[in-house]
Amino acid sequence: MTTENFDNPFLKLKTRNLLLRGLLLSIGFGIGLGIIQGITKLSFNSQIVTLVLYILIFGFLCLWELADFRRLGINLKHVVGNIPNQQRWLPLAGLVMLIILCSLSAYLVSFYLLSLAAPAFVEGILREAAKSPSPKNTASLFYNILSVIALVVVAPITEEFLFRGIILQRWASKWGMPTALIASGVLFGVLHANFVGLSIFGIVMGVLYVKTRTLIVPIACHAFNNALAVGIGFVGTGSQTTSAVDGLEQLRSGVWGGVLLMLISLPLIVRFLWRNWPRKNALLPYLINASQEQGGEIAG
């Protein structure tokens, strides 16, 4: 059975529509929240608001994309893939640990280099990062529960569905799988503060999806990654007293540790990518899953 036996519905999807919808939802919910605050005269906790908006925006964005699935005849089951029965999870856990080390090292090294040219800009980023929602042992129970739901449940499911399930397969249909892996990974990194580290993370998650043909594997790895970050937040002191200037000094003092972590983790990640990198004409996980459900094999 060849690819000609299957229509590729991802040729009809438009990534720009997905991005535009995300922007519209962000504006819409932001305006709605402002109206509610104006009417009720209530002042909401900014970090709780951020978490709620994240859940709403990404949740509704996924529902909007699922409406396109129904319109275009895209089978969600073929996007998600089958539950892996013989997946070796321990090596994947090790891979996630390597990605965390690499991401941390990329953060330290890249921001250190950037601070040499634009210290004020880096101080601003550090200041905003300190305000970003994350679980803390000094925070309220409601806030921590909401953080865990957003970071460990909602983020892995929605982000993997959107970036790997849709964007990766759409761009692979246009440019080939290798280019799509890099482009979708970089887009994933652009939307996070740690651009370099999260771009690498996005590329590795894409390779895992192509390799296993199931979103369950990258979702599980993403959830494990975020759960480790949540755990670090719980065991930390939760102090908010560190200034951006102090943070910049800590960043500069830790740069050699970042270089060491990069020398340890990056070669192993590159080795993983080299051994599992797909060919340009590699088929979409969607098409392979659709073929296997009908008892055939796609050539290519």
Image: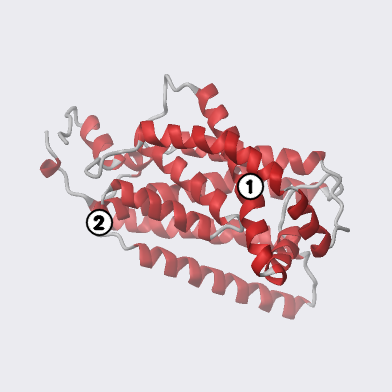
Please report whichever mark, 1 or 2, sits nearer to the chain's N-terminal start. 1
Quadrant in which the C terminus appears = top left
Quadrant in which the N terminus appears = top left
Element at badge 1? Answer: helix
Identify the residue shown where x is 57% and y is 48%.
154
Identify the residue shown where x is 29% and y is 59%.
13
Identify the residue shown where x is 38% and y is 35%.
274
User: Which of the 4 quarters of the picture holds residue 90?
Assistant: top right
Q: Where does label 1 land, which residue?
A: 151
Q: Which circle, 1 or 2, is nearer the viewer?
A: 2
Compare residues 285 and 69 and report the one nearer the observer: 285
Q: Give the percent coordinates (x, y) of residue 275.
A: 37, 31
Three-letter code for the amino acid on which mark 1 is drawn: Leu
Q: Where does label 2 land, which residue?
A: 174
Instruction: Give neighbour class at mark 2: few <14, some 14-19, many 20+ (Cα, 10 Å).
Output: few
Element at badge 2? Answer: helix
Q: CA distance from mark 1 to mark 2?
A: 31 Å
Instruction: Give neighbour class at mark 1: few <14, some 14-19, many 20+ (Cα, 10 Å).
Output: many
> Quick check: can you spot residue 66?
yes
Compare residues 153 and 92 and report the one nearer the observer: 92
Three-letter code for the amino acid on which mark 2 is drawn: Lys
Q: Give the percent coordinates (x, y) of residue 53.
A: 62, 62
Lateral position of residue 296 relative to residue 269, left or right: left
> Quick check: can you spot residue 214?
no
User: Which of the 4 quarters of the picture holds residue 29?
Assistant: bottom right
Q: Give the percent coordinates (x, y) of residue 93.
A: 56, 28
Compare residues 264 and 219 and report the one nearer the observer: 264
Identify the residue shown where x is 37% and y is 67%.
17
